[in-house]
Image (cartoon, helix red, strand yellow):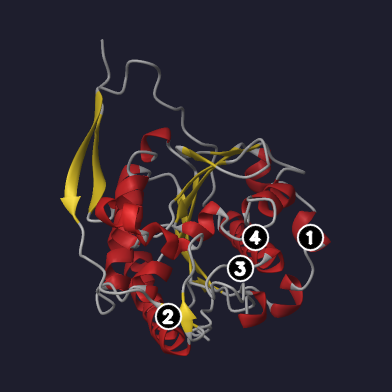
Amino acid sequence: MFSSCSYFYKVPQDQLSRPSPESFRSKAIAGGSNLRILPLGDSITYGQGSSDGNGYRLPLYDLLSRWNKVEYIGRERHGSMSNNRHEGHKGFPIGAVGNTGKLDYVERPNIVLLLAGTNDVVFKINLKTAPEVLGRVVDDIVSACPDAVVLVATIPPLLDRNREAQRVAFNAALPAVMEQRKEAGKHVLLVDLATVTTRHINATDGIHPVDEGYRLIADAWYKSIVHADQKGWIKAPVAKPANGEVDRIKPTIQAMPIVPGRPIVAGRPIVAGTSAGFWSPFRMLAALVVVSVGCFWALRN
């Protein structure tokens, strides 16, 4: 739907129908360089609703690891796979996703997978400005990790019709936001998840993909990584800071808007255990604040 924008990489439908097309698996990414990948987002990055808890991360790992050494980074661990690090948080809107991600930029990923915005739509958090907030998160990533490729995905379908219309509007605003960054020379790509349809969404919570949906997301990430490599954007990751180079990581507290009421999906409240489970009575108090981290480090003589 955004094919007129040259920076937007829309994966062909026929390619996504095959989980591991040979045309994309015939060579290594970046000449076989290590891939240090930061999966950054909300409960979809976490893998909520997938049968093994890995979400898209395991099928993407399988696609990439045939030719490259793949390392996921992040402070969270979830899923049955051993390489299961990520930075996906249930119920987090875009701003909170960006704030928590700052903790990981010091590890200097060479690929960042950013999928955020579902909770902004579900909970109707500043919908008019949400795409620009996402753009500022991209700016923060590029500033902290100038050697990284940043892939930003559209958000998958929602079963609630009212919120689905808002999701479509959110996705439609992303090309212009990303075009600004492209014109500034940033290595960013917008990844269309249009192949993930309502039949790939869990009917119980109306938000999270089922296993096949997660496989389609992995395929979309993979083809976009290949596309970025064809542009010459992916390089070997820079060295991580050695012990003692990080001077301090100081958390601060930032107020977060109260979300009025419980969202309705497919005519009924979202049940606990979905990303909306983050707004349970116990966690509602915690949801009034998010951790904003300023990362400061200095090289010691």
Earlier-in-chain disc, 2 versus 4: 4
Numbered disc 2: secondary structure: strand
Numbered disc 4: secondary structure: helix
Earlier-in-chain disc, 2 versus 1: 1
Numbered disc 3: secondary structure: loop
What distance separates the C-alpha of mark 2 from that of mark 1? 37 Å
Q: Which residue occupies the foreground of this view, 165 or 233? A: 165
- The nearer-to-camera label among 3 and 4 is 3
- The nearer-to-camera label among 1 and 3 is 3
What distance separates the C-alpha of mark 1 from that of mark 3? 19 Å
What distance separates the C-alpha of mark 3 from that of mark 2? 17 Å
Q: Which residue is drawn at the image coordinates 72% and 43% (left, top)?
A: 65
Q: Which residue is mark 1?
A: 20
- Mark 3 residue type: Pro
- The nearer-to-camera label among 3 and 2 is 2
Q: Quadrant of residue 244?
A: top left
- The nearer-to-camera label among 2 and 4 is 2
> How packed is label 3: few (under 14 Cα within 10 Å), some, or many (20 or more)?
many
Q: Which residue is mark 4?
A: 218
Q: Is residue 300 above or below residue 116?
A: above
Earlier-in-chain disc, 1 versus 3: 1
Q: Are marks 4 and 1 in contact (CB under 8 Å)?
A: no
Q: Are marks 3 and 2 in contact (CB under 8 Å)?
A: no
- Mark 2 residue type: Ile
Circle number at residue 264: 2
- The nearer-to-camera label among 4 and 1 is 4
- The nearer-to-camera label among 2 and 1 is 2
